[in-house]
Every structure is written in C-alpha cells, then in structure tokens.
C-alpha cells in the first residue's frame, strides 16, 4: 500500500497535466527505509516525448548524490501516460530498477491538461513482476 499526502498527490497530478501531451516524470524521496514519500522532486523528461520518458542522466546522478547525503531513497518514481491507461508498459517494467520504490503512473488521456480527474495508480515492480497496490491519500504524513 502506498500512503501519500494530499499535497504530494496534487503536485504529481499537476506536473502530469502541465507536461501533457508529453510524459512527465519525477521522484518523491523519503528517509531511507521509511517508505515515507516526503520530498517531491520534479524532473525533466529528457526524451521530450508523448510516449516515453527518460530522466536526464546528469540530473539523476545529482539527485542520487543528494539523496545519499540526506540518507534518503526514492520512495515514489512517477511518470505519466498521455494516451494510454496508467499501467506500466514493457519498457517501464524493464527500466524498473528500485526494488523498494512505488511506481506511480498518472494517465492524462481523458482530460489532458484540462480540469478533470486523472487515473492515479501505484505498482510494485520486482524482477519483471508487476503488482498493483492500494493508494491511500491522507491530509498530511504525520
């Protein structure tokens, strides 16, 4: 189960809508071993694509160094799908390399960057196996 605070949920959705029709991506870091998504980090989709996302390698390296210094790990790795459901593609599954991370997908296919609901789903991806998990949005983590 992924427990996420409303502000972080809203930030992920806003990023996905803002970058539509391209895929958005980012990470929510948290204290190592805590499973608490606390620090929202919006990343740039270096691919600039509506069908694929790629973290900029230098940005990602800098973020991992910063997380290491802060004793953090990626708790959520998120990206959006702009024309398909919020389910990991074969490429997404192949790129999933963080065994403790929640992989969040937001589909903006129905409303794009306009007002309206999005599909927000979370998965664990381990050794190519995809398991959907419940998402619980709370007012604040505390």
Image: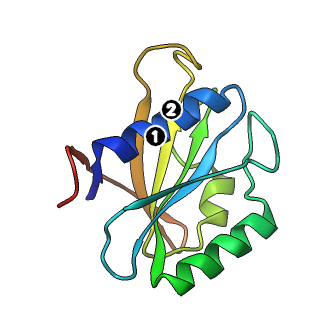
Which of the numbered marks, if any, corresponds to residue 11?
1
**Percent x, y for residue 35?**
32, 71
Quarter of the image with the C terminus is bottom left
Residue 127 location (% of width, % of height): 53, 75
Instruction: Tell me the colour scheme of the image.
Output: rainbow
Position above or below: 72 against 129: below
Whether residue 20 sits left or right of residue 35 in the image: it is right
Q: Residue at x 45, y 85 (%)?
A: 71
Q: Would you say residue 140 is visible in this rendering?
A: yes
Residue 3's image quarter?
bottom left
Are the residues at dot 2 and dot 1 in contact (C-beta closer than 8 Å)?
Answer: yes
Q: Residue visible at 46% across and 14% down? A: 115
Q: Residues within 10 Å of mark 1 (few under 14, many from 20)?
A: some
Report the quarter where the N terminus lies: bottom left
Element type where label 1 sits in the image: helix
Asked if residue 86 shows in the view, the reply is no
| Residue sitting nearer the eye, 45 or 107 | 45
Q: CA distance from mark 2 to mark 1?
A: 5 Å
**Where does label 2 land, which residue?**
14
Comparing 3 with 87, the one in front is 3
Is residue 51 toward the left or the right of residue 89 in the image? right
Instruction: Give the residue displayed 66% in from the left and 32% down from the top.
Output: 19
Against 25, residue 113 (above or below) is: above
- SS at mark 2 in the image: helix
Residue shown at 58%/39% (left/top)? Answer: 80
Residue 53 coordinates in the image, percent (x, y): 72, 48
Nearest to the observer: residue 49 or residue 65: 65
């Amino acid at each position: 189960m992924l427990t996420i605070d409303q502000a972080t949920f809203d930030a992920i959705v806003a990023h996905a809508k803002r970058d539509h029709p391209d895929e958005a991506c980012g990470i929510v870091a948290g204290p190592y071993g805590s499973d608490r998504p606390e620090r929202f980090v919006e990343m740039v989709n270096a691919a600039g694509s509506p069908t694929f996302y790629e973290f900029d390698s230098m940005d990602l390296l800098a973020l991992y160094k910063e997380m290491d210094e802060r004793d953090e790990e990626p708790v959520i790795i998120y990206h959006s799908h702009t024309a398909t459901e919020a389910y990991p593609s074969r490429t997404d599954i192949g790129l999933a390399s963080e065994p403790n991370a929640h992989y969040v997908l937001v589909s903006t296919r129905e409303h794009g960057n306009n007002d309206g609901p999005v599909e927000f789903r979370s998965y664990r991806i381990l050794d190519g196996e995809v398991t959907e998990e419940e998402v619980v949005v709370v007012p604040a983590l505390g």
